[in-house]
Amino acid sequence: GYKNYLSGIDKIYAQIKKLMKKDAYVVVEVSNTFDKDHPMTILAWDVGKVISKHFYLERDFIFCSKEGSLSSSTANNNHSYCLMFKNK
């Protein structure tokens, strides 16, 4: 489920940190999710919080898609967040 997914993200970025040079950057594109059967999740910010345990969250960018849809029955595909982290 959701908590296991975030735990996996935590483990992955702990390993990535070991391979990265100091002052290197990693950018993660992630979207919040929702559908008709459950409320929206703040996945982008939950992922950001988890990765921030390993890297410094320097800034975010919003990526907007012209092809996206605001339909409440699909994932939020009209925009996503690009979270930029620095290895300090």
Image (cartoon, helix red, strand yellow):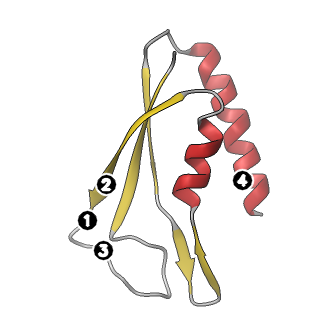
Precedes in sequence: disc 4 or disc 3? 4
Spatial CA span between label 3 and label 2:
13 Å
Q: Which residue is mark 1?
A: 65
Residue located 61% across and 53% down the image: 46
How far across and how far down the image is residue 87, in percent? 51, 19
Residue located 59% across and 14% down the image: 19
Precedes in sequence: disc 2 or disc 4? 4
Spatial CA span between label 2 and label 1:
10 Å
Disc number for residue 30? none
Which image quarter: residue 9? Answer: top right
Residue located 51% across and 65% down the image: 32
Q: Amino acid at mark 3?
A: Gly
Q: Tell how many labels.
A: 4
How far across and how far down the image is residue 33, in percent? 54, 70
Q: Which residue is mark 4?
A: 5
Q: Is residue 57 above or below residue 73?
A: above
Spatial CA span between label 3 and label 1:
5 Å
Between marks 2 and 4 in the image, the one whose residue lies nearer the viewer:
2
Q: Which residue is mark 2?
A: 62
Q: Does residue 27 appear left or right of residue 17 in this picture?
A: left
